Amino acid sequence: MGTDTIERVDDAALLLIIEDNATHRYILASWLKRAGHTLLEAGDGTEAFNIPSERARDGLALPDLAVVDVHLPDMSGFEVCERIKSDPATAGTPVIHVSATAIAPSDRTQGLDRGADAYLAEPIAPGELIATVAAALRYSRARVRAESLAARLGVLNEATLEIYGASQAPALAAAVAKAANRLFGVAAVVLTQSPHSDAVHLNSGLDGSAPVSRLVSADLLAQLVGKSLGNRVGVATAQATAPLWPGGDGLIPLAGEVTVTAARTKRGRPPVVVAVGAIIRQDEDRKLLTQLTQTAALALEALRSYTEEHALAVTLQRAFLPARLPRADGIELAVRYMPAEVENEIGGDFYEAVHTRAGLLLAVGDVAGHSMEAAIVMGGLRHALVAYAFDGAPLHEILEKLDRLMYSVWPGWTATVCLVLIASGGREIEIANAGHLPPLLRGPGGACELVREHGPILGALLPQRPAVRRPVAAGTGILLVTDGLVESRGVDLLISLEALRRAAAAAPENPDALCDTLLEVFRRPQEDDIVLFAARIADNGQDGPGRADEGEGD
Amino acid sequence: MQPSVWDAADGESGRARLTMSTRREAEAVIVTLVGELDFDSAEMLGELINTVFSEHAARVLVDCAGLEFCDSSGLNVLLRARLAARAAGVELALVGVPVALERVLDLTGTTTAFVRYAGVEEALAGRRGDDAQNGDGQASAEG
C-alpha cells in the first residue's frame, strides 16, 4: 500500500466498509476519513446488512457507497454486492470491491459482472482508492439527480394539468401550492388575485393536507414583489429571512428561510407569488420554481381571458333578449331565462312578447347550437319576428318568412319557434308551432293540455301549417318552454312532456308562481338554456284583454 | 374507398359517444352512426358528411339504426346535409330511423323532410318502406 499525501475531497460522503481483516479495514478507513468521508464499518456480510435497517429505524441516512472485500467469512463480497444491488432501497449505492487475494483478471471480471462499480486489487495506493470512490460517487450522484429531476418534472407536468384545469383562482392557487409542496418538500404559500376582483387569495399547503385558502390584503402582494419583480413583466426570485406572515387560523407560518418567486405575464396585471419555506440553492430547483410560478401566471391569465369572454358572451346574449315585457291589460306575463350552467357555452334560446294589429303575440324559440354565433342568429331572428309580426300577418306566413330568411341569411342554421297570438278581445288564441315543444294550455278549471299540432322547424325550407285556433276564457293560462327544461338524455321526451303537463296542472295559477314551481320541480344539472314563458288571461277584466300603453319593450 | 371509422369521444371519460363509419357500395356511400348524436358529436358528423359529398356519390345513405340519442344539434346537421344534398343533386336518405330520432323528427315537423328506407338492403335496392316519403312533402300534421 502506498503512502501518498491525502487531500480532503469537496464532496464528502457516508461510506460503509465491509472487511473482515481488522488491520486492512483500519488502514482503508483511515485513508477515507482523512479525505473527509464519514465511515461505517462492518466485519462481515451479516453485520453489514444490519446497518441499513438499523439506520432507517433511527431515521439516519443510508451509506452513499460501499467498499466491500471480496473474501468475507460468511459470504463472498460478490454476493454482498448482488444483495445491495437487488434491494430497491440500496440499488443505487455504488459498490467498490477490494481484494488482496482475488487479484486475477477473471476475479475482476466476475466482480464487475456481478454488479460492482469498480474493482481494486492490492496493492492499493491511497490516492487510487480515494479517486475511485470520488468517481463512483460522482456518477451515482449525477444519476440520483437525474432521476429526481425526472420525477419532479413529472410532478410539474401533473401539476400543470391540474393548474390549467382549475376554473377559479382559489382552486388554481391551491393546485400551485400543492405542487410546490410536492416539488420542494417544504411549506408553500401562493398568492393570486382573482379575475374581475381585488380579492387576493392566499393558499398554503403542507404534507398533502388540503390547501387552506384565505383572503388577504392586496398590499401584501405588492409588498412581496416590491423589491424583486416590481411592476415588470417576467419572473423574479428573491430570498428572505424575515417572517413573511405568522401562522395560525389554519395557515402555515412562513418564517426563517423563504424563497419568493413572482411572475407577471402582462403589463398591468397583478403578479402571482409562490413562496416556499426554504432557501432554494440548486439551479435545477430554481428552474422548477420559476417554471411553476410562470405556469401559474399563464394559467391565471388564461382564466382571466376566459372569464372576460364568457362575461361578454352572456352580456351579448342578454342584449339580444327583450329588456322587459310589454304591459297588456288583462294579461299577466312572467318569464324565466336560465343560461346553461356549462360555463363555456351560450345558447340560442329566446322569448318575445309584442303588440301587433291582431293582438298580443307571444313567442318562444331555440336556435340550434351553443355558441356566440347561435346567440347572434337568435338576436337577428327575434328582431325579424317582431318586424314580420307587426302588421298582424297570419302566423304561418310569419313563420314561412322567417324560414326563408334563415335559409338565405344564415344557411345551415335551424330554429324552432312557437307563436301564440292572444287575439284582441281575449276570447280566442291562435297557435302556430314551427317544430318547437308543444305549448301548454291550462283551462280555468286547471285541466292542462299540450297543443301538439305543429309544422316544421325553421331553416329547412319546408311549408308551414296554418295556425290552430282555440277559444279561451278568463283564467286560461298559456305556458311556453324550451327543451332545456325537460330534455333529459335517455328519457323519452314525450314522457318528460307528460311530467311537465302534470306538474303544471298541480302548480299555482299565477304565472310567476307557476314558473318558479316548475323550475323547482325540474331542477337538475343543467346543460342547456331554459326559457319558461307563462301568460294568464286575467279573470277580473270586464272587456277582456286589450292593449295598454306601448309598454317599455325594446 | 376504404371503410373508415371515426369516434367522437367524450372529453372527460374518453368514452366514444358516437361512432361513425363510411363505406361505398357502387353509387352509394353509406354512413353508419352508432351511439349518441348531440352537440359534441354533431360537428364531427357535419365534417364527415361534407367529406362524403366531395366524393361525388350519387346517393348518401345515413344508417341511423344504431342511434340511441339525437338532440336538436344532431337534427340540425342532418337538415343541413339535406339542403346541401339538394343543392348538389345528391339523394340523401335516412335508413332504419330509430325511435330516438323518430321522436325528434316528429316534434320538429320534419318526418317528411327526408327520403327514408327501412334498412340498408332496401335502400340499395331502392325499395322504400311503408313510411317512406318523397322527402319534400308537407310536414307531418300530428305530434
Image (cartoon, coloured by chain):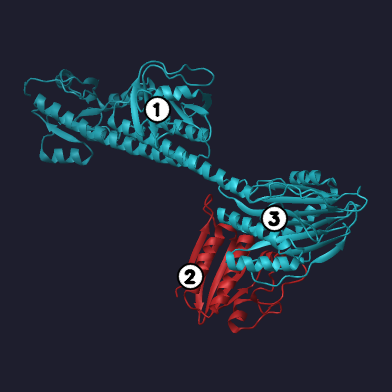
Q: Is residue B70 visible?
A: no
The kind of residue tagged 3 is Asp
Q: Which mark is residue B51?
A: 2
Query: Residue A282 placed where, x, y %?
Result: 29, 28
Query: What residue did someone put label 3 on?
Result: A483
The chain containing the residue under callout 1 comes to A
Which one of the lettered chains is coloured cyan? A
Asked which quadrant contains residue A99, the reply is top left
Which one of the lettered chains is coloured red? B
Q: Which mark is residue A87?
A: none
Q: Nearer the viewer, residue A517 or A318?
A: A318
The kind of residue tagged 1 is Gly
Query: What residue did someone put label 1 on?
Result: A185
Toward the right, the furthest residue is A542
- The answer to whether the residue labelled 1 contacts the one labelled 3, judged by CB atoms less than 8 Å apart, is no
Counting other residues with Cα less than 10 Å from the Cα at mark 3, is it few (<14), some (14-19), or many (20 or more)? many
